[in-house]
Image: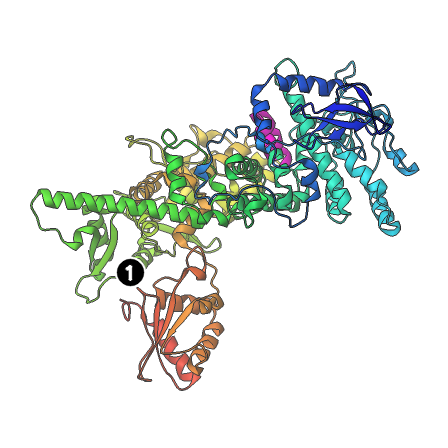
Amino acid sequence: MATTQNNGEQIRLIECPICDHKAKQQVNSPPRTICPKCGNFYVDSGEGPPQPRRLVRERQERKNIPENEERNKQGGRLQTISNFFQNLGSNKKGKNKTDKPYNSARSQPSSSMSEDSSSELPPITNGQMINQKRSPNFQLSLTSKSRESLSPRSLRSDKATLSPQNRHIYPVRTKNIDQFLDDIKNAKEKDNWKIVQDFYSTTFDSFMEINAVFKRDPGKEYKSTEDPGLKMDFVQIVFDNLLDTPQEIQKATLKATINSLLKDKRNQESGNGMIRPHTKDDLRAYLVLMQNPQFESASTYVIFAHMLRQIAALNDHDHHFLVHWIRRLKSVPVRKLIKRLHSFISIRLFPPRPQDLPPMQKCSWWVPSATKVMALINAANNLSSPPLVPFYEFYNPTLDHLDLMAEYYTWQNPSSCAGFSFCQYPFILSITAKRTILQRDSEQQMIIMARRSLVAKVQRRQLPDVGMLFLNLNIRRAYLVSDSLNEIAEKQHDLKKKLKVTFVGEPGLDMGGLTKEWFLLLLRQIFHSDYGMFTYDKKAGVHWFSSAQCETYQEFNLVGVLMGLAVYNSIILDIRFPACCYKKLLSPAVVPYNNPRAVVGVTPLTVNDLKTVQPEVASGLKDLLLYDGDVEDDFGLTFQVSQSEFGSVKTVELKPGGVDIYVTKANREEYVQLYVDWVLNRSIYPQFQAFYHGFHSVCASNALIMLRPQEVEMLVCGNPNLDMKELKKVTVYDGYSSNDPAIKNFWDILFSFPLDLQKKFLLFTTGSDRIPIGGMSEMQFKISRVSGSDLLPMAHTCFNQLVLPGYKSKKSLRQKLLTAIENAEGFGLE
């Protein structure tokens, strides 16, 4: 019945358009109310104001979808939206069940981000908010100042209308930064936030409103990837002030944001079944909403997750625009956005209060969505020169606690382990996580090789021995390079076994120390300038491959094997190659299968790369590119290059007929590019090819695909930043205590040493002057006491142990310690 009498009051029957729940309501009350069952707004089913057409259509559409009906019968929503916002910022526990422990991102069913009704956002409108579709009796109270910033034209329609030229008609929004800051100042002084609340609730109520406020010229299209057309300073100021406003304004902003996201989703799905493509204004709105600092709070994660899903689901063309627009942002907002996404992912994986979040099985798309949005930011960062933020700021250390090998196997076996894996997005995995994957993959390959050797021994009816499980190298110190070459050549099939080195004629069991010393001595000899394999530029401080032709390039292959063995056996090397060397080493990251003639180690490089190898030559080429005079007459260059080889000068053409082609303003860029390519690629190709195959003969693993060139360098060379105070924190004592005078004197002396002496001390005690990539905290260092004050300090490099006698004076300790570290080679090393 439409209208009845109850105690003298007129009431009417109203019905929810979502779940069909019916309730009674007074006729004179507002015509729309929140449904107590599902949290949605509903309209009356009898007399009274007519139902808006949009709600009638949505109701009919939902009635035609049994799946939605079944979901709502089950209680479908996480919470009613009214309760959700009442609990914002509170410590009340939600009604959700506690999440099951998260073992791996692989527990998420797929990266397709399937819909889950239990985490859908219900429509949000509010009688106190600026709503673009109002009932006839809705009245909005505005001050005179707020009327100037709110045009009546914006209140007419929820959808953008098109002019004859097919352009959106935007609401008129003229408020600028100064006016906004004046509003904030006045609100604080008078404790009247009405104008500010109207601004926030209106601005974020729809994508069209966002563009009307923040777009530089709403009448202009801005379809270029180079310019998003937004007043980014205004965006930052609006968001910077948001968290300082009263809770009512922050809640109103979130409600408006939900409204805008729902409207965009409806616009995409409505109509005749066709999906409407997003406009550039939609992308601008997403770019603005991403920067909302409210999403740093876990209480807003449901809204944040839905926004991330909508952004992740955009097509490649839209992602292309977003990537180029993100690179136009400043470093500070980009850094904040990265931090926000990291927090979202970490809290979803390891929630401190699981009851505050929906169950994992109902929001398995949260983490993939956030990671995909992070990938857009990473792509923008890679396109920027210089990068907006360092690449390591994309690392999420929380992921180090996942089952990384499970992630790796999911990535490697998509047919049998379908689903999302963080290895698909390696930029988010820390160098520590990647090292773990690489080392465990290496260990498993070592086990496979050892098992094969054991089976072969048994088949030949030979007695197995422990030595068959290792790559055993017997080296004579006087023939260091030749013995190393011969041993490695003879034992190619054992390179993936654990490495053990024995110096012929010397006692000592290799527990790691002799291996470190072998690496150190061999590389020191190979990289010596007299050996002729590598050149050294003092200004750049790096080694580079000699372009002199050789009869055999086996020694370059040996250097590659050494680097591979170092990574494989977790040995840190003191090798000074420029960054472009590691770019070449990953070109390609996986050796072409069964194709020995495939081109390897060649990658496009620039003058900036040449600057890291030959800074003076690179500076001359840059001067050539910027020269305003007559290039041909003043420089007199042709397309050829000269190189010194064993005391003679050799001339090489950069392209056919180059000797007769002069460098001019028109072709100087081509000349510079050919010159760089010749120095860094063509002139050293056979040398680098041997080096490349040597490295990959040991380190062949798909895990290399996940590594950046900088990360390969860190795996090989470790962390060059020494901090002896960090070493003190991880030191344990045997026979001493941290308060003993001898220990206090020792640390005072070590801290006073210059950097080169500190490196020598580290070399003396650990066998390497580099520290692990994770820093000193990954080391174990021990100081043991021994009697005899006339003895020198001794070291056990296998165990990172210093044996220190109890010297009576600080002067004696300093003298003995200096003597020990200056004469450490081949002595005191086990």
- Total of numbered circles in the picture? 1
For the point 37% across and 79% down, the residue is 816
Q: Which residues are magenta?
A: 308-327
Q: Disc 1 on helix, strand or loop?
A: loop
For the point 46% across and 68% down, the residue is 729
Q: Which quarter of the figure has residue 785?
A: bottom left
Dot 1 alpha-carbon crowd within 10 angstroms: few under 14, some 14 to 19, many 20 or more:
many
Q: Given the current orientation, which residue lies at the most extreme left position? A: 461
Residue 688 belongs to magenta span:
no
Q: Position of residue 268 (x, y in %)?
A: 64, 22
Q: Which quarter of the figure has residue 87?
A: top right
Q: Position of residue 748 (x, y in %)?
A: 48, 76
Q: Which residue is mark 1?
A: 512
Q: Could you tell me which quadrant the N terminus lies in?
A: top right
Q: Name the residue nearer the viewer: 678 or 19.
A: 19
Could you tell me the amino acid type at mark 1? Gly
Q: Position of residue 295 (x, y in %)?
A: 65, 43
Residue 253 showing in the rendered view = yes
Residue 546 showing in the rendered view = no
Q: Could you tell me which quadrant the C terminus lies in?
A: bottom left
Q: Is residue 112 above or below residue 346?
A: above
